[in-house]
Image: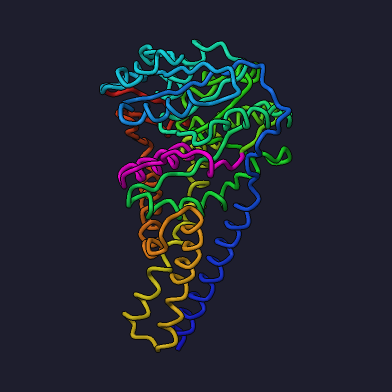
Amino acid sequence: MLTELAVAAFSLLISIGWAVILSMSQRNRKKVRSLPRADGTCTLEDRVSVVIPVRNGEGIIGQTLNSVTAQEGVKCEVIVVDDRSSDGTATATARFIGKGVVYVLARERPEGWMGKSWACHEGYLTSSGDWLVFMDADSQLQEEGLLMDALCFARSEGMSAMSLMPRLRTDSIASKVMLPALYALLYVLAPPYKTTDPSSDLAFFFGAFIAVKRSAYEEVGGHHAIRDKLLDDKSLGELIKSSGHRVALLDASDRFSATFAGSFRGHVNGLQRLFTQYAVESVQERGVLGGLLFMTRYLAAAVLAMIPPVALPIVAIALDLPLYVKLLSLLPVLTVITGHHRISASVGIKGVYSLTIPLAHLTILSVLLYVAARSLSGKLVLKWHGRKYVYELRRGRGKSLLAG
């Protein structure tokens, strides 16, 4: 009898918890301001430098450059920084040289620099614009006035920097499975609207589109100041906002798109990169023991939230509990699926993929457990875009090394 009541009560508790989490996620999503369209009185005299770092982007750089060179109302130079690609990126970019695109082959990356930050820094050194716009190589602007609208907003609101949230493409099955769960967690753990709120310390940018005044970029040290950070976009946003500048993160998902990670392995690597950055920062800020204890809190919360919806029905069946308990044990997973169904619909994913949300949660939890276990060993190893980075946590710092 006690077991029956415990399973039933826990099922109700987990269901309520997930209902609150998903409701909070939806509420925070609605608080994100959309990028407004500029009125007819806005004219831009400032020169803009669009910097696009790329590594082995032969298949995507052409579409990106087509969308950027088609932008209207902006005096724009486009700089493609090739981060030592081994494919036909240079040839694909060469087709746009006549359209004002500048091709830069990045110099050998110095020790202590992440690849993308080094490429962005190389682009900055080549640029001459009053505004710097950093874009990922797979970002595609679907409206010819997007760049002008973004900079007109920044100027009218007195912003030193701003970032735009894209529509993340869901071409692969892995993206359809993983993205709804990642969206839900994003809007709960790091609500994007707080980046724009000057009273909040939270700040992060989307690497798909970051616009920053040259003067502000140089004042804070640019990518040189965040050269060893895995999450360069998040780190740049934090750096600029913490320096006293006004920043904004707006929703432009109806006006441009980008890719988070195409394959399942890409999503796993992306999650590992995210959790590794947080592990390194925790150790740097709190020391080895304090950092690991801080991470344990998140790990415990993830286990408590993500395991029960799958485990409770199994327990109820295995113990042959009464029918009412078995039905109640299904309530958490049904709550999770129903809540994520709404998120899936909002980003254009068919509702049937909501049934795979438990798989997405178990994937996230597995990567988190892996990073936590590696952190306890004192060494984190991450492979990203063909490079290997090693972080020695026992020394209370992260040191990146290039292998291969």
Q: Residue at x 43, y 13 (%)?
A: 102
Q: Which quadrant is home to the C terminus?
A: top left
Task: Where is residue 250? Give x, y as percent.
Answer: 61, 40
Any magenta on residue 118? no
Q: Residue at x 48, y 80 (%)?
A: 6
User: Quick one: 368 or 43, which is closer to the camera?
Assistant: 43
The relative height of residue 383 versus residue 342 in the rendered view (above or below) is: above
Q: Which of the 4 quarters of the picture holds residue 259?
A: top left
Q: Residue at x 44, y 61 (%)?
A: 306
Any magenta on residue 252? yes
Report the residue that reaches farthest toward the front: 40
User: How many numbered discs?
Assistant: 0
Task: Where is residue 8? Give x, y as percent.
Answer: 48, 81
Task: Where is residue 61? Give x, y as percent.
Answer: 37, 27
User: Quick one: 160 or 114, which is closer to the camera?
Assistant: 160
Q: Which residues are magenta?
A: 250-278
